[in-house]
Amino acid sequence: MTDLWLPDVRIASAAPRLMDNTGRFSSPLSGTMRTVSRPGDRWGVRLEYANLTAFDRSRMEAFIARMRGAANRVLWSPSDFPQRGSFPSAEKLVNNNFLTGTNGWSVSGGTLTATDRRLRLTFSGGGTAEAFQTCGLVTNLPHVARYFLVDGKGTPLALGALTSYFQGSVVTASVTSIEGLNVITLVPDASSGGQYPFYPTSGSGNIPTGQIAGNYAEAVWTSLTQCMLIDNGPNLLEFSDTLASPWGAFASSVTANAATAADGTATAAAITDTTSNVAHYVSQGSLTVPAGVADFMVCGEFKAVAQNFLWLSLVEGTGSTAAVQFFNLSTGALASSSVGSNWANLRSVIRPLGNGWYYCAMVARKTNAATSLTVQLGPSNSGSSSSYAGAGTAATDARRVTCSQSSVPGRQVQSAGAAVAATAQTGSAYYVKGLPVSTAGLLLPGDWIDVDRELKRVTNQLDSDAAGLGYLQFSPPIRTSANDNDPVIVNVPMGRFVLSNNQNGWQATPGPNAQPFGTYSLDLVEAAA
């Protein structure tokens, strides 16, 4: 089974249909109709092509031959309905479908050619070889790069001969390429970066493994756009609400369920300082994280009591350096921040929750190989120093403190005596993150989206809060739940389809009166894989 790219040939008509899996039962006594809802709703579409000639006719007939009936899959994107919402989904690549040849693309270590809207990189046989384009990016918001690749001479994609990647400034995301659609997400830390559809995996001496002069790789389509991310709500911390052991209290004490939280429940913990002139805080350490460069997020709900400021801190376990952000819980503003030597790209947000409560979040990038983190939080009387002479009274209320590996602020998740793994979402909605902040109408009813090559149609307006969080509602319901931090794609959303039967052909006029025209019809049904 192989995924194929549907040729970008003019479609005479498209007839999408939603194929529901509801069971029906008619009572033999009264004739009353009853229904039972079952999972498995999917899209179908009938595509009609009329009077294709020459180039387009050849491409369509070659595509039908490669479909092999229902053996292979095709990626189809609806183009009958323009996006109504304001989500910034514009394509960032120039000539991303190679309609104008190699225009906009650069090459190193080889030569570029474009034939039949395919970009071919032919290797020169020494050193690195890459095809690339430098694009404008939006700092600290998620982007998705997609490349549809086909096997070339000497580059069997199934054997991992190529890597696809794109980069910000110091951060890079990459995948070992496969034949078909390759998808990569990145939250860039710079306003420009390079995109590389194919880059031969380097061997000894930085020479592509197994590549000689004349070998080549091909791409039939590329894309780089902004996206949003799935928020499946993991939490590395235990006892998010009560701040009980393994949380430790330093020059302070914690009383669980001592305050009314923003949602009106008596589930918030009170942090009481001592009278010492030191830092008063609570801490939980030994949070296991991957080695290497990665972004981490800590957030929670907080309310000022005796002290007007709060600070959040992430401490890496090797050099014990920290990223720290102070928040003003009186005015709802960010205060001072600091970044230790093994941290970078700190960014923070605060937003009101009502009744004096605020959502506070901090994201920072760990730049060393530490494999453990410590989360610290505490009250402050200045917004610039964690040390002060306490009054021995409740200083700050806190609830639902959450830490996860994330490049953007996420939602709070309740935990008890164990960390919470990312939880698969089901139904007809996803919690999402990484949206442009405080924006209404990012998506509107009728807009199309793509989550892991499942096509969905938006059924309710998508808005974002000041942290870039939202709740995305759509139809049909989720068939296979997406992973945490998977992209939700707005630009050229696509689904994976299969022919509804094992036969497909076309209509032409043979013989001495043959016409240079061909008529084609594809009846497609959304496939699970």
Image (cartoon, helix red, strand yellow):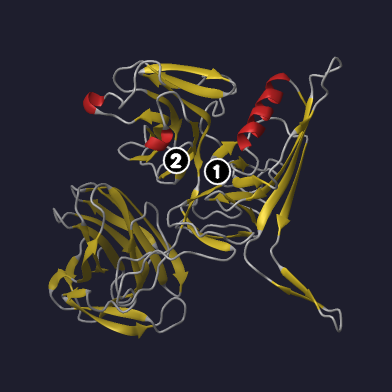
* Residue nearest the observer in this picture, 488 or 122: 122
Give me the residue at 53% from left, 57% from top.
464
Marked residue nearer the N-terminal end (1 or 2): 1
Give me the residue at 38% from left, 59% from top.
333
Task: Report the residue marked by disc 1.
Answer: 88
Q: Is residue 428 above or below residue 177?
A: below
Q: Is residue 497 left or right of residue 159?
A: right
Callout 1–callout 2 Cβ contact below 8 Å: yes
Q: Quadrant of residue 401?
A: bottom left
Q: Amino acid at mark 2?
A: Val
Secondary structure, mark 2, is: loop
Q: Quadrant of residue 64?
A: top right
Q: Is residue 370 left or right of residue 506?
A: left
For the question of whether residue 7 can be seen, the reply is no
Residue 481 place in picture, x, y as percent? 50, 60
Cα separation, mark 1 vs mark 2, equals 10 Å
Task: Report the residue marked by disc 2.
Answer: 138
Q: Amino acid at mark 1?
A: Pro
Q: Which mark is residue 369?
A: none
Give me the residue at 65% from left, 56% from top.
42
Residue 10 place in picture, x, y as percent? 72, 31
* Residue nearest the observer in this picture, 271 or 219: 219
Residue 520 place in picture, x, y as percent? 76, 33
